[in-house]
């Protein structure tokens, strides 16, 4: 039986590419989407898919009443993402989160709901395989270098800051160790905001300018030497499709919450 997938944000930049990938993947069936702008329309027509009728709804409550699915892929905006996720978990659905901007507090709440409903959530800040590798290499570096910071780059219209990729990277590095601070906040001279934000014991800076798509750097320093690990995205959402499909396939293999695509990958 095919895995029935519903994409919240199925007409968006990343969600539309993933929706096309789902429709072409054997063993998956794209059964619906969420989009306020295109509510009531046929996703198959919008994305030019040879898949019959794929209904689009404006809200998750209506979608849950009218469409049966196994996995929700959450790819909308941070202000509605948690509502979509929790509503789906309460109906026993498994969830893959691609939306950025959710906090650690949000994930703690989501994890509890998932456990209470015997469901699973796979939260992936970035589905690109190169980001998975950057996260892994950064964790290795953090074991040996206690001095590190993260720089998060994106286009000027990205509303969440830091990005989900930067948040996830900070979370993972904090599990290795907190980055060292040489000048405390009370001793700092000038505008404290210029040093970015302290996120789970890791210093994070966000840049939002035209000309950028999405990039992230983890920078490590020792006396007279430094290491920079950087990921850069291009203008296409295609790099996120394979990772998204893998997440959909793997989300039902556990219960509760897992963070990071590599948590379900075999190396």
Image (cartoon, helix red, strand yellow):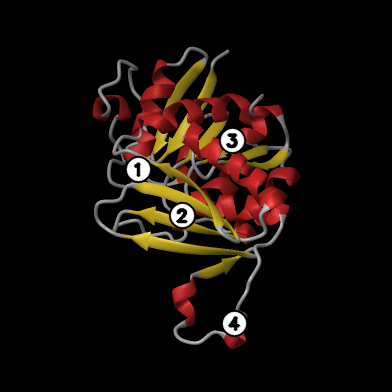
Nearer mark to the viewer, of 4 and 1:
4
Q: Is residue 6 visible?
A: yes
Q: Is residue 5 above or below residue 228?
A: above
For marks 4 and 1, the one nearer the N-term is 1
Nearer mark to the viewer, of 4 and 3:
4
Q: Secondary structure at mark 3?
A: helix
- Taking depth in this image into account, of 223 and 95 the one nearest to the observer is 223
For marks 3 and 1, the one nearer the N-term is 1
Nearer mark to the viewer, of 2 and 1:
2
For marks 4 and 3, the one nearer the N-term is 4
Q: Are marks 4 and 1 in contact (CB under 8 Å)?
A: no
- Taking depth in this image into account, of 66 and 211 the one nearest to the observer is 211
For marks 2 and 1, the one nearer the N-term is 1
Mark 2 crowdedness (10 Å alpha carbons): few <14, some 14-19, many ≥20: many
Answer with the quarter of the image where residue 119 lies.
top right
Q: Which residue is mark 4?
A: 185
Q: Which residue is mark 2?
A: 163
Report the disc number at residue 261.
Answer: 3
Report the disc number at residue 35.
Answer: 1
256 sits left or right of 218 in the view: right
Answer with the quarter of the image where residue 241 lies.
top left
Which residue corresponds to the image point at 44% horizontal and 26% vertical from the top-left? 31
Locate residue 25, reporting x and y percent.
Answer: 45, 16
Tell me how many marks there are. 4
Q: Secondary structure at mark 2?
A: loop
């Amino acid at each position: 039986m095919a895995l029935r997938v519903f994409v919240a944000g199925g007409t968006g930049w990343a969600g539309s590419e993933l929706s096309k990938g789902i429709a072409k993947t054997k063993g998956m069936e794209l059964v619906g989407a969420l989009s306020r702008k295109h509510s009531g329309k046929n996703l198959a027509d919008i994305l030019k898919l040879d898949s019959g009728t794929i209904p689009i709804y404006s809200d998750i409550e209506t979608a849950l009443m009218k469409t049966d699915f196994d996995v929700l892929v959450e790819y909308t905006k941070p202000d509605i993402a948690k509502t979509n996720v929790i509503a789906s978990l309460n109906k026993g659905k498994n969830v893959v989160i691609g939306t950025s901007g959710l906090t650690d507090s949000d994930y703690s709440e989501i994890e509890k709901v998932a456990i209470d409903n015997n469901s699973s959530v796979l939260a992936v800040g970035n589905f690109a395989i190169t980001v998975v590798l950057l996260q892994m290499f950064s964790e290795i570096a953090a074991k040996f270098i206690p001095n590190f910071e993260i720089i998060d780059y994106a286009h000027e219209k990205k509303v969440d800051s830091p990005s989900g990729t930067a948040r996830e990277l900070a979370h993972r590095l904090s599990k290795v160790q907190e980055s060292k601070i040489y000048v405390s906040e009370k001793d700092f001279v000038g505008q404290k905001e210029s040093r970015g934000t302290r996120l789970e014991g890791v210093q994070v800076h966000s840049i939002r300018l035209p000309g950028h798509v999405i990039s992230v750097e983890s920078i490590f320093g020792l006396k007279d030497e430094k290491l920079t690990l950087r990921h850069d995205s291009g203008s296409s959402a295609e790099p996120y499709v394979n990772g998204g499909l893998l997440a959909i396939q793997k989300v039902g293999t556990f219960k509760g919450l897992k963070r990071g695509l590599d948590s379900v990958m075999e190396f």
